[in-house]
Structure formats: structure tokens, C-alpha cells
Amino acid sequence: MAPDEEFDNEKKKEPEEKEPSEKPEEKKEIKEELEEELKEEVEEEFKEELEEKTELDEKAELDEKAELDSEAELDKLRFHYRGFTLDELRKMNMDQIVQLLPSRARRSLKRGLATRQKKLIERLRRAHRAKKRGKDLIIRTHIRDLIVFPEFVGLKIGIYNGKDFNIVEILPDMIGHYLGEFSLTRRRVQHGSPGIGATKSSKYVPLK
């Protein structure tokens, strides 16, 4: 072999030294960039979760407000007497109801009920029990000075007006009033045309 060829083979046999591909400063920069990207991704995910939670909370608050508004509206539509509903009034005893009535009704009840009024109340209570069983009774009475109590609501009473028994269904708005207020003893007077000869001008009314 020629000496030049031997020298070339020795060069080939020698291991080639690899140049460092990346410097330590570049590695640090790459690590920092990766960390920043990860932080940004985590922050974005956290923001999205917060936005979703706030949206859900807002929807829940709106639903609660709507429910409260609907309950308030329903409560307004319900009947109230001096701040109490009909069910609450029915649960009260007589002394508690008397304290809620107007002064005139309170005074008459403090003096005590007459025997005829007590008998009528007993009849009305029997009618109330019969209504629960499905029987709709009409109680006729001449007593006009009895005060309407909450337990009478829903019953039908025939109240005498001096000529007829006017059938009245007791409504919640009637509580505290007297029965006679709902069966008037007088009618509205409506005059017709005058008869022939009743007045001077009616003499010349042509006959039809």
C-alpha cells in the first residue's frame, strides 16, 4: 500500500468528534418557553372553568328570582284578611278571629251570641261537614244579624229579605260582614210610562 493510502485509512478509523448540538443557554430558554406555554394553557383552562361556573351561578340565581317572583305573585293573588290567609283563619279559635274583626262586630260578639244565632251556627257547621261528604245543602234563615266567620266560606245560605229567601254563596271577601248586607230588602224603583188620563198631556197620547 502506498503511504498516502495508509494515512487516509487512519483518518477514517479515527472517531469523528461530534459538535455539541445545543448549548446550555439555549436549553434553558427552551425550558422557559415550554413552562410559559404550560402556564398560559393552565390559566386559559382556569378562566374557562370560572366563566362556566359564573354562568351557571347566574342562571341559578335567575331561576331562584323567577321562582320567588312567581311565589310572590301567587301570594298576592291569594285571599288575605288582615294579613292572614283563609287556611290560617280557619285554624284560629273564636277569640283570635274576634280580635281581627271591625270594632262593631267585636263589640257585639263580646256581649255574646243569641240562642237563635248559636242554633244557626250549629246548622251551618252541620252543612259544612255534609259538604265534605259531597252533599251541598242550602240553609235558609230569617237571621240577618249574624257575622260571617271563616268557617262559613263555601256554604250556600238562603237569607230572608222580607219576601223571599235570596240564596247567597259565602265568599272569603264576606268575612266580617253581616248576612243581611247580601240580601237587600229594597229594590230599585223603575217607573214606566204614565197611563192614559193620568196627566193632562197623556190624554192626547195616540193609542197603538
Image (cartoon, helix red, strand yellow):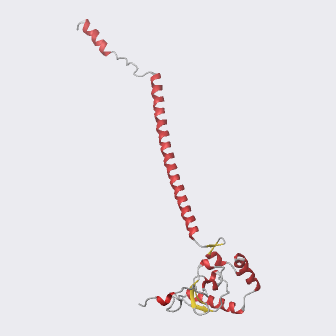
Question: Where 83 sits versus 69, above or below?
Answer: below
Task: Answer with the quarter of the image where residue 176 lies.
Answer: bottom right
- Residue that lies at the very extreme toward the right in this rendered image: 111
Q: Position of residue 100 (x, y in %)?
A: 70, 75
Q: Quadrant of the C terminus?
A: bottom left
Between 171 and 187, which is closer to the camera in this rendering?
187
In the shown orientation, is residue 144 left or right of residue 10?
right
Identified at 60% across, 82% down, the residue is 153
The image shows residue 35, relative to residue 23, as above or below, that is: below
- Residue lying at the far top of the rendered structure: 3
Q: Tell me the residue at 50%/54% (across/down).
A: 59
Numbered-mark total: 0
Residue 63's x, y, as percent?
A: 52, 58
Q: Position of residue 163 (x, y in %)?
A: 59, 93
Q: Quadrant of the N terminus?
A: top left
Quarter occupied by residue 20? top left
Residue visible at 65% across and 80% down in the picture: 177
For the residue pair 147 and 38, the one nearer the viewer reads as: 147
Indicate the position of residue 135 as horizontal and vertical percent values.
53, 89
Q: Is 168 positioned to the left or the right of 91 in the image?
A: left
Q: Toward the viewer: 166 or 150?
A: 166
Residue farthest to the left, as pictured: 1
